[in-house]
Amino acid sequence: MTSSPGDDVDDDVLCQLYEFVVCTLLIGAFGVFGLVGNATSFVVFSRQRTTDSASASAVLLLQCMAVCDSLLLVVAVAVYALPSIYPYTGHLQSIHDTLDYIIYVWPPAMILHTVTVWLTVLVSINRYVAVCRAVEEFGTTTLLRRTRIQIIVVVLLSVVYNVPRFFEHKARLTFVLILTGRR
């Protein structure tokens, strides 16, 4: 089976359409729905008044998860959805052609991803302690304070763990600039 030069053009258009549908439309739609869901969750948890420290720590963790997940969704749209618009539609060429923004968007995206994953683990541990160790933790007023410290530790460790991300794209960008003759 031989391919003609026109087949490559059709394949390029199909690839651009696929990338537009998956990255821009699907990721964009999931991002919007996720932001609406996280905003709703945050508002509901903000209005909830709790008297015991176990419930208050769970509410605090879930509010932190809603905020971090919302920030992650915004960054995901910036990393995946926006650059996929230009190849198919011809709009937002400056975002597609600019490699510099990845240096500034990718590391925070990885930090937020790590924070979101570890906050999920922290919620699981918190719920385990609240259910299975309720008698031992009953009457403990330091549970909310301990949860705040755990959240701070998760954020700090996520930042430290992802510090190398700030340098991984810089080398690639320099290499691309050298190849294209811009440097």
Image: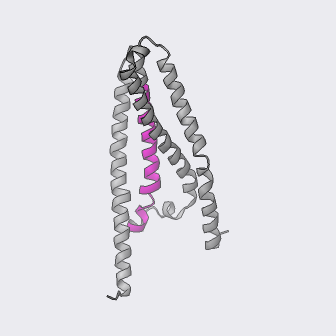
Picture coordinates of residue 21, whole percent (x, y): 33, 61
Picture coordinates of residue 165, whole percent (x, y): 58, 51
Looking at the figure, which quarter contains the C terminus? bottom right
The residue shown at (52%, 65%) is 97
Which of the 4 quarters of the picture holds residue 136?
Answer: top left
Q: Is residue 125 magenta?
A: no
Q: Nearer the viewer, residue 25 or 131?
A: 131
Q: Nearer the viewer, residue 115 or 63?
A: 115
Task: Name the colour scheme.
Answer: one colour
The residue shown at (54%, 56%) is 102
Which of the 4 quarters of the picture holds residue 100?
Answer: bottom right
Direction top: furthest residue: 139
Main secondary structure along the magenta-highlighted residues: helix
Q: Is residue 61 magenta?
A: yes
Picture coordinates of residue 13, whole percent (x, y): 36, 73
Magenta-drawn segment? 59-88
The residue shown at (38%, 17%) is 134
The residue shown at (50%, 60%) is 95
Picture coordinates of residue 113, whole percent (x, y): 47, 44
Relative horizontal placement of residue 14, taking residue 176 as reference (left or right): left
Tally of marks: 0
Work out whether 75 lies above or below 7: above
Looking at the figure, which quarter contains the N terminus? bottom left
Q: Nearer the viewer, residue 98 or 58?
A: 58
